[in-house]
Image (cartoon, grey):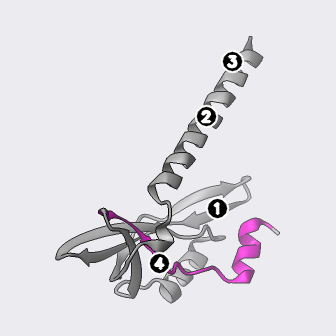
Amino acid sequence: MFEKAGFWILGCSVGAIAIYCAARLVRYRRNDEWPTVDGHVEGYGKIRHMDDNGSASLSFTSVSFSYSVGGEWYSGEWLTPTLQNDTALEKFLAKEMPVGKPVSIRYMPKHPERSLLADAPEIERSDAIIQLGL
């Protein structure tokens, strides 16, 4: 009986994830064709942690940005890469996304509230290796 329930829970979870991914693909399709505008970094969300098998706490946060389209102001968020600890995340933010930094924003012309960073910063190779646990 538990095996059957587990199978249904797994199936429903996979189905929900597939629907979510499909919705994101439709919502942000062809975003490389969206126009760009200038924006700037407004601030950061609360630093969040993921437990890495009980041995370390990985850190990430959201970066808020604002931009103007047709005289209207909008805001959006970008999730940072997950880094090995708070210190690494704070260094990354200070270097790549300091508050007030000008950023390029892509927005959907029919729905300018839908946006993303045009050139999101990438993590350095050494941080990526730690992030992947290699």
Q: Give the range drawn in magenta.
A: 111-133
Query: What residue sits right under mark 2 in the picture?
Result: 15
Residue 118, numbered circle: 4
Q: In which quarter of the image is residue 102?
A: bottom left
Could you tell which of marks 2 and 3 lies nearer the N-terminus? 3
Amino acid type of the residue tagged 3 in the rendering:
Ala
Decide: few, some or many residues near mark 3? Use Cα within 10 Å; few <14, some 14-19, many ≥20: few
Amino acid type of the residue tagged 4 in the rendering:
Ala
Mark 1–mark 3 Cα distance, whole angstroms, equals 32 Å
Query: What residue sits right under mark 1 in the picture?
Result: 57
Asked if disc 2 and disc 3 are in contact, CB closer than 8 Å, the reply is no
Q: In which quarter of the image is residue 130?
A: bottom right
Q: Which quadrant of the rendered structure holds the C terminus?
A: bottom right
**Residue sitting farthest toward the top:** 1
Q: Nearer the viewer, residue 121 or 111?
A: 111
Decide: few, some or many residues near mark 1? Use Cα within 10 Å; few <14, some 14-19, many ≥20: some
Amino acid type of the residue tagged 1 in the rendering:
Ser
Amino acid type of the residue tagged 2 in the rendering:
Gly
The secondary element bearing badge 1 is classed as strand
Nearest to the eye among marks 2 and 1: give it. Answer: 2
The secondary element bearing badge 3 is classed as helix
Query: What residue sits right under mark 3 in the picture?
Result: 5
